[in-house]
Amino acid sequence: MPFPPAEPVEGAEAKPLISKKKEIVLFSSTAIALYGYDQGMMSMVNTNHSYLRTMQIGETSPVVGIIVSVYYLGCAVGAVVASDWADRKGRKPSIFACLVTAIVGNLLMFVAGLGPHGSNPWGGAALACMITGRVVLGLAVGGIDATIPVYSAELSKDEARGRALAQEFQMNIFGLLMAFAINLVATSALGKDNEWAWRIPIVCMQLFPIILLSLISRLPETPRWYMSKWRKEEAKEALIKLHGEDKGRDMLQELSTAQREEDDNNEKIGYMDMLMPSGSQFHPSMVTVMGQINQALTGYGAVSVYGPQVFELLGFGVRDAEYVTLGNFISYFLFMTVAWLWIDRYGRRKLMVWGSVGLSTCFALLTVFGALSLDMPSVSRLAAEIPGSIVMFVATAIFGICWLATVWLIPTEIYPSSARAQGSAISVIVWGLANFAVTLLTPIVFNNLKYWLFLAFTVTNAFAGWWTWRAGGRSFEENQEFFNSALEEDSWVVQKVDGGKFLRMPPNSEAKGDSVEEATPLLRSRH
C-alpha cells in the first residue's frame, strides 16, 4: 500500500471540525435555501425576451403566472407524499428522494426548448416541458419543506427551537439572494435576448441538491422516528452521537416512555382526524391553516417572485428596478439576523400581529408613492422612488423578522408528536395552494391595478393581523386543553367553549406574558 493510514495514537480521539448538531443545522439550512433559490430564479427569468419567445408567450400573458404558480401545486402534492414516506420509511429516505426529484425537475426546466445555435425545434413542447419541470421541482421542494422542519426539530435539544428555524430561513433568503444575483450578472453580461441569461441561473440550482446528496449519508436518522418503529438500539446510537453517553441514555428513556404511552392510547392519527370537524386534531389543523393563509395575505410571495416588477410600480425603469431589488434582498438577508434573535424572546404571535401592523402601514405609504410616481407627472419621480424604496426595504425587513419563520414553527409546536409530520404536510399544502393563487393572480393585477396592488396588500395585512390576534396566546398545554374541550362541545369558537374560559388565559409568570412552552424542545417528553 503506497500510502498506509497513520497508526492511531492510543488514548487520543480525533475531534471533528464541527459537531454533528452543527452539521444538521447546516444541512437543513442548505435544504431550505433550495426553496428560496427558486423564488429568486424565476423573478428575472420571467422578463427575459429569449425565454418568452422560447415558451411562445407574451410578456403580459397570464401564462407567465401559470408557469410560476404550478410549482406551488406540485409543492402541495409533494408535501403529502414526502410526509407519508417520512413516517413509513424514515426522514432521511424521504429527504433523499426529494433531492433526486429536484435534480430531475430542474433539468427539465433547463432543457426546455434547447436547440443548436439558440434555435427552438421544440415548438409548443418547450412550454409543456417547462411546466412539467416546474411541477416536478415543486414536488421535491414541497417534500423538503414538509420534512426538513420536522427532521431538524426532532434532532434539536436546544431551548430555542424558534431561533434554530429562523437561522435556517435566513439561508432561505440567502438562496433567494444568490439566485437573483446570478440572474442579474448573467442578464447584465449577456442581455435579455440571450437564452443563456435565463438557462444559467436555472442550471446553477443543481448545486444545492448535489451538495446535499453528498452530505446526507453523514447525518443520523431522528431518534424519535426510530422509537416510533421501536428500533431502540438505533435510537440510542443516534442520541449518543448527538448528545453524548449520559444525556443520550436519559433522553432515550424519555422517548421510550412517551412512545409507550402513545402506543397504549392507540394514538395513530390520519389526515381525516386532522381535517374533519369531528377529528381529534381538527383544531390544531385550523390554526396551522390560518397561519399559512395569513402569511400568504402579507403579499410577500409576490414580492419575492416578482421583485423588479414591484419596484417598477414605484416608477423605476427595468434595469434600475432590478438593481434596487438586489439591494432589497441583501437587506432582507441581513435583517433575518434580528428574526432569530427575537423569535424566542418575544414569541410567535406577538411578532406576527405587530408585523401585520407594520406591513399594513408600509403598503399604505407605498400606495401613495406609487400614485405620486405614475399619476402625477408634475412631481419628481425621485421624490417618490427614494422614499418608496426605503419603505419597501422596511416592509421586507418586517416580513422577514415577524412572519417568514414563525408560521413554519406552528405545526412543530402545536401537534402531539404522533401527528407532527402530517401537520407539517398540511402546512405546506396550504402554503402551496395560497401561493399558487397569489403568484397566478399577481401578473394580472400588475397589468390592471398597477400601484393599487399596494392598497390591496394594506387590507390583506390588516386582516391577517386581526385574525392572528384573535387566535389567542396560549401555551401548548393550554391549547391542548382547549382543543379537547372544543371537540367535546362540538365548537371551536373560543367564547363558546367552557363558558369562554379560554378567551383570556392567565399570564405565565415565568415567561413574563409569553409562554415558555414556545421554546420547549421537541425531544423532551410532553406526556
Image (cartoon, grey):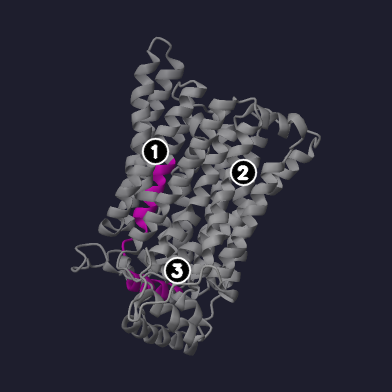
Coordinates of residue 196 in the picture (x, y in percent)? 64, 33
Image quarter for residue 527? Answer: bottom left
Question: How far, Cα to Cα, is label 2 from label 1?
Answer: 22 Å
Examine the rendering and report whether any part of residue 192 can be seen. yes
Q: Is residue 74 above or below residue 379?
A: below
Question: How far, Cα to Cα, is label 1 from label 3?
Answer: 46 Å
Q: What residue is pinned by disc 2?
A: 203
| Residue stretch rendered in magenta on the structure | 460-487
Image quarter for residue 398? Answer: top left
Q: What residue is pinned by disc 1?
A: 330
Instruction: Confirm whether the magenta stretch covers residue 477.
Output: yes
Label 3: element kind: loop
Local crowd size for mark 2, using a 10 Å CA cut-off: few (<14), some (14–19), many (≥20): some
Residue kind at label 3, given as amino acid type: Ser
Coordinates of residue 496 in the picture (x, y in percent)? 38, 67
Local crowd size for mark 1, using a 10 Å CA cut-off: few (<14), some (14–19), many (≥20): some
| Badge 1 vs badge 3, beta-carbon distance below 8 Å | no
